[in-house]
Image: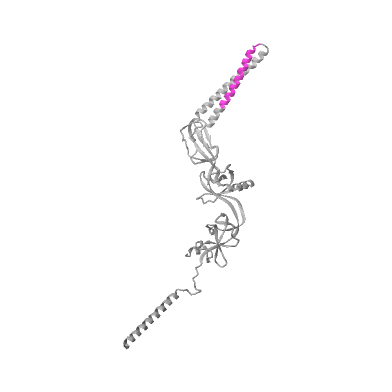
Amino acid sequence: MGSGGVSMRLRQAVVFGVLAVAVAAAGYGYFHAEKPKPGLAARPAAAPVAVAKVEAETVPVAVATIGNAQAYSTVSVKSRVDGQIFQVGFKEGQLVRKGDLLFVIDPRPFEAQLRQAQANLERDKAQLVRAQLDLKRYAELSKKDFAPQQQFENARATAESMQATVAADEAALLQAQLNLEYTRIKSPVDGLTGNLLINEGNIVKANDTISLVIINQVRPIYVSFAIPEQDLPEVKARMASGALPVEVTIPGDSGGPVRGEVTFINNAVDTSTGTIQLKATIANDDNRLTPGQFVNVRMTLSTLAAALVIPSQAVQTGQNGDYVYVVRPDQTVEQRTVELGPIVDAKAVVRKGLSLGDEVVIDGQLRLFPGARIEIRSAAQSKASPA
């Protein structure tokens, strides 16, 4: 083999060697570039949250429910005599007072009956006077044996009969006077009139099934509502010691709540719902409540002194019940189960699980987990921050 073949093989060996070194170096750099340097691992960003402290407050224990207004009394006005409606003395929806004139039935037939009853009474009174004189005369004659005993007895019977007739005439006269009074139908209560059900000119009958008008007494007015039966013992205890106040809020009314007190507890619990009906009496001097109107009812049963409270938005619900995120000194959070009491005005009473002064997360909980780092901001800032 010549010197040219040796030099060719030598050059090929050198080229292959260089390529192998380059490939090895590239592989070494590739595998070692994937390994992070110790101490430089990325930490998750702190979650922006808003927090609040556990505070001690006096909290009223109240029952809130929905009720509806009911008329204090409802009167269906009817005629007590037959006749034609002669006059209507009110307008539909008018507030009337007790004794106000509502209807006038044609009084002329009843005036005639009254005059006839008066005439009958005067006639029979005159006959009674004559019968009594005859009785007196026959009594004297009978004593002297100038008249038979039979005539005396007949005179006595006639006088007694006329006396009874006069009594019947007096009763008839009284009935005629009442019938004449019944032609003027007056309001028996203070209240609001409803629709006029029979117009002027129509013939009405005494105690007909159809009413002339319906009046609802609304001063005072009832508010009826139901509460769970487990609250009944406390309600009874409160009513035994004094008045149980109630606040009624009217939806859509900016005038604030109206106040009254519980005056009625039903005599049985509704077994289908587990509730019992109560009624509160409201003065309703300004006519803000109307029968049938739905209202919000709030009844304060007692107060909790120095109760631990947190904003209700801090409370989350999981598989094991209610919990909150509590802030640790190292700016991480701990998930803690809590036992809650009543929630009043967006504040929840905490019976167990927290201590006075603990800080709980009230906004930004969706970004948290046990041990998560946090950055405390205001509620507005935490809502504006991206996840």
| Residue at far bottom of view | 3
Q: Position of residue 349 (x, y in %)?
A: 58, 56
Q: Nearer the viewer, residue 341 or 129?
A: 341
Look at the image and tell me whether residue 135 can be seen. Answer: yes
Name of the residue lying farthest toward the right: 144
Scheme of image coloration: one colour
* Total numbered labels: 0
Of the pair 67 and 12, the residue shown nearer to us: 12
Please tell me which residue lies in front, 380 or 112.
380
Which residue occupies 34% across, 86% down? Answer: 6
In the displayed structure, 41 sits above or below 345; it is: below
Q: Please state the horizontal and vertical placement of residue 300, each as a whole percent of the image.
A: 59, 50
In the visual, does 273 lie left or right of 11? right
Q: With respect to residue 250, does 309 lie above or below?
A: below
Q: Is residue 285 visible?
A: no
**Residue drawn 53% across and 30% down?**
180
| Main secondary-structure element of the magenta-colored stretch | helix
Image x and y of residue 125, in percent: 59, 22
**Where in the figure is residue 169, as x and y percent of width and height?**
57, 24
Bounds of the magenta segment: 146-173
| In magenta segment, residue 99 | no
Residue 154 within the magenta-colored segment of the rendering: yes
Q: In the image, is 192 to the left or to the right of 242?
A: left
Q: Is residue 290 above or below residue 329?
A: above
